[in-house]
Amino acid sequence: MKKRILTSVGIVITLILFFIMKVFVSDYFFDALIFAMAGFAAFESSKILTKAGLNNYLYVSLSFVAVQFLTNFLGIFYSLPLWLIVVIDLASIIVMSLGCFLWSLISKRTKEEIRVREVKTTMPKFSLKKAVGCMITFIYPTFFIMLMMLLNHFDSLNLTNVADFNGRLSLIILMFMFLIPIFTDTFAMLTGMLIGGKKLCPKISPKKTISGAVGGTLWCVLLSTAVYFILKSTNYFYDSIAGGLPVWAFIIIILIGSVIAQLGDLFESYLKRKAGVKDSGNILPGHGGMLDRIDSYIFVAPYLLIAFALIVVL
């Protein structure tokens, strides 16, 4: 518990420092943090999927982090439309997955791998399965995490009406991207401990309860709404919030986001169950691996990107 608390404090301090650098220095510092998160998470995801039976190329999975970083960076730098940046990202997933299939199909090592793993299949089928495994690692977690870059530069995206939010919407979005999972996870655990009751998904995550899931979402909405009004009361954020973020829309976004955060947590737990491991890694003392720490954020990031893009455009 002591290690977990110390690591949590370190994580919070790190996030605060990067938020300070985003406000007073440059948005690109946060990009570096996102890149590091994606790299560690991709490494752990590749390992877990291999143990779960979805073989993939570890180094290709890691290299795809750099590919996604580059495509998003160039898309932001050249002010490409949001939809075009996402299409390019998805196209890179397809191209690299196809490359993995062709490489596995012609590689001499594939036959040896089939023999060592004692798999009764043909090279095309094995290569296709491996390409699918690579594609999954490209999407989860890399593609989802790298969408955080678009949140980080949201004010610079080529979106209709984004100027109405006074250039501080990306800061608000990033702030709640981290707060939603933190509020939800913390109060889901506390509510579950206090009330208990029927398990949510006993086969996937035995400790989670229905009362905890509901309590986590309700407290997340309440606390996030309180933060919303606190921010709105300040001169720094008032124009950004008053520019087109009504409280009813904000509450709906937080409510759905809290549910999605818990689904992200359950999805990673499912992968670990399939792989037969307790933690995704050991890089964060007391927490496990990077995936264990950011599993909720991985699904929240693309959701917030879609939600706020619709708010800005509409």
Image: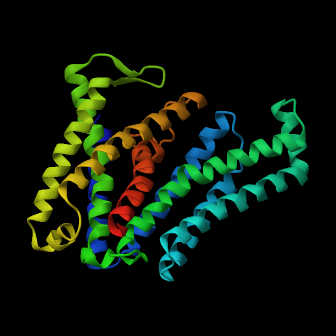
Tell me: 246 left or right of 64: left
Vertical side of 246 occupied by 225: above or below: above
Image quadrant in which you'd find residue 87: bottom right
Question: Which residue is depicted at the point 47% across and 45% down?
Answer: 291
Locate residue 71, reporting x and y percent.
58, 71
Residue 144 versus residue 1: which sits nearer the camera? 144
Give the residue furthest to the front.
314
Locate residue 193, reporting x and y percent.
24, 23
Residue 271 shows in the view: yes
Vertical side of 128 occupied by 39: above or below: below
Tell me: 139 left or right of 60: left
Vertical side of 26 occupied by 303: above or below: above
Q: Locate the C terminus by quadrant.
A: bottom left
Locate residue 151, reporting x and y percent.
39, 65
Locate residue 156, reporting x and y percent.
39, 78
Tell me: 249 left or right of 306: left
Question: Which residue is depicted at the point 69% across and 34% down?
Answer: 53
Question: Which residue is depicted at the point 24% across and 54% down?
Answer: 250
Question: Which residue is depicted at the point 28% across and 69% down?
Answer: 169
Give the residue furthest to the left.
233
Vertical side of 235 occupied by 258: above or below: above
Image quadrant in which you'd find residue 261: top left
